[in-house]
Image (cartoon, grey):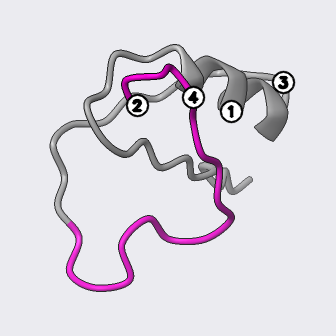
Amino acid sequence: MPADGTSTVTDGPAHPGEETLGGWLIIDVADRAAALELAKGLPAPETVEIRPILVSA
């Protein structure tokens, strides 16, 4: 997050090339909007990428 406390939300992959993974969390929220609000409060130094988990029957 920038020093001024703002955040940027984009729709698409965070990195178009090779991905790196520093860790992951599974959260249970009502919808994408709730996931975005929760992600804004995480103490991540750089990028937080949100992806849905597909559940098959």
The disc, 2 or 3, on the residue closer to the chain's N-terminal end is 2
- Residue at the (84%, 24%) spot, across then down: 30
Q: Which mark is residue 36?
A: 1
**Residue denoted by label 4:** 6
The disc, 4 or 3, on the residue closer to the chain's N-terminal end is 4
Q: Are marks 4 and 2 in contact (CB under 8 Å)?
A: yes
Q: Quadrant of residue 15?
A: bottom left
The disc, 4 or 1, on the residue closer to the chain's N-terminal end is 4
Q: Are marks 2 and 1 in contact (CB under 8 Å)?
A: no
Name the amino acid, label 2: Met
Q: Residues within 10 Å of mark 2 (few under 14, many from 20)?
A: some
Q: Is residue 41 above or below residue 44?
A: above
Which percent across, then down, holds residue 28?
65, 21
- Residue at the (47%, 49%) spot, across then down: 49
Count up the numbered dots: 4
Q: Quadrant of residue 6?
A: top right
Tell me how far mark 4 sits from mark 3, CA to CA. 24 Å
Dominant SS of magenta comes to loop
> Element at badge 3?
loop
Which percent across, then down, holds residue 7?
57, 35
